[in-house]
Amino acid sequence: MDYKLDIGGCCMNGNGCRKNTSKKLATFDWLCDLPETKISTDFVEVQFKNTRKGYFLNSTKIPLEKGDLVAVEASPGHDIGEVTLTGQLVLIQMKKNNLNPEKIEVRRVYRKARPTDLEKYEEAKGREQATMIRSRQIAEDLKLNMKIGDVEYQGDGNKAIFYYIADERVDFRQLIKVLADAFKVRIEMRQIGARQEAGRIGGIGPCGRELCCASWMSSFVSVSTSAARYQDISLNPQKLAGQCAKLKCCMNYEVDAYVDAMKNFPSKEIQLETKDGSWYHFKTDVFKGEMTYSSSPNVAANLAILPVERVKQVIAMNKAGQRPEKLELVKESEKEIPIDFQNVVGQDSLTRFDQSKKKKGGTRNEQNESRPKNRENRNRQNQNKDNRNERKPIVLKKKNQQNSDEKPTE
């Protein structure tokens, strides 16, 4: 049996062409290359506009692949969606979403989308923007404290889903009547949160990448400021809030790693006592295993960076009633060696210029006293010169004699 590698979540059909489903919240089908998984179930996963997904039964055994546009059962009429999963992985996804085929209402796949179905779908989709703007004006006229964030028409255009955001409970019974009269369709209202609205609108985050809620996140977990405290992030609302005006979801990604690492750290509330004074916790570098202490509780002054072992050692000494001289341990290689500075040139003397003048001149008595000594030295030098001169002729005579002896031989 030949197996083909599925690259990038694309399925290979019989002709060898790839159908890439790079839509938002697409699921990688890691079982699509196994032929036996395709006949394991008749359920398929169909994705509609944005994040809405549904599971439908392919009762007529239509050969469906990932990326096919199909017409599925809806109430009323039919809807148009794209197949995102087939085979064994669909059952795994249904189990993950707590959907039991025996307890839920099973809807069917009618057919693959025809050109007429796609024309109606595109026509209905083109009315969504104008419908959303008009519905916002109607809600404002009725003085309802709500915001309509998105409108989704059904594939056949007989139904419209209005997604709205509201901080409080809203009585929109009158709004439904007005919307039904204005647009002549069946109205369905669905409340969403601020994070879900940001995922529908999309955008680029401060990290430079596409928003997580718009690319792969399907479930939203509550985020608290304690996640920022664990990671020593500045509690600045402008930096902690995302485009949805809520705390960023990515703050929860590394909290578990920080919590596990912080178990070996002492409490930040403990002060360190030394003979120089008290030291207060300033910040912690979890992954380096270092803690920074300041001599002032309010200002970063005289910062000292200590490893966790040294902090625990100082705390143990304080509990025993002892105070170290300094927080940091001085290593042998870092000890200061005293340097003995010597006045070699004499630049430190204030009278160095006066001393130089005395050496050159001096008083007349000193000059007179030094003259006899100078005369004696000169006489000695002259005698040495005379002795040298007396020896030189002797050497010259010998050389001359040798030269005279050599001439006859020539």
Image (spheres, rainbow, N blue to C red):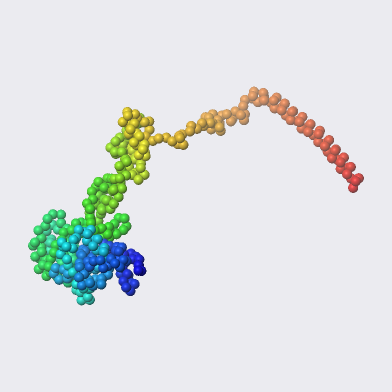
Indicate the quadrant where residue 101 lies.
bottom left
Residue pictured at 18% horizontal, 65% vertical: 151
Q: Residue furthest right?
A: 408
The N terminus lies in quadrant = bottom left
**Residue 291 appears at what percent x and percent y?**
34, 40
**Residue 149 appears at what percent x and percent y?**
18, 61
- The mark total stands at 0
**Residue 354 appears at what percent x and percent y?**
56, 29
Q: Left of 353 or right of it: where is 163?
A: left
Residue pictured at 74% horizontal, 30% vertical: 381
Residue pictured at 26% horizontal, 68% vertical: 39
Residue pictured at 22% horizontal, 76% vertical: 115
- Residue 188 seen from this side: yes
Image height check: is 214 above or below 306? below
Q: Left of 37 or right of it: where is 305?
A: right
**Residue 289 appears at what percent x and percent y?**
35, 42
Image height check: is 410 above or below 43? above
Task: Out of 308 and 127, give the one closest to the viewer.
Answer: 308
Q: Left of 181 or right of it: where is 50?
A: right
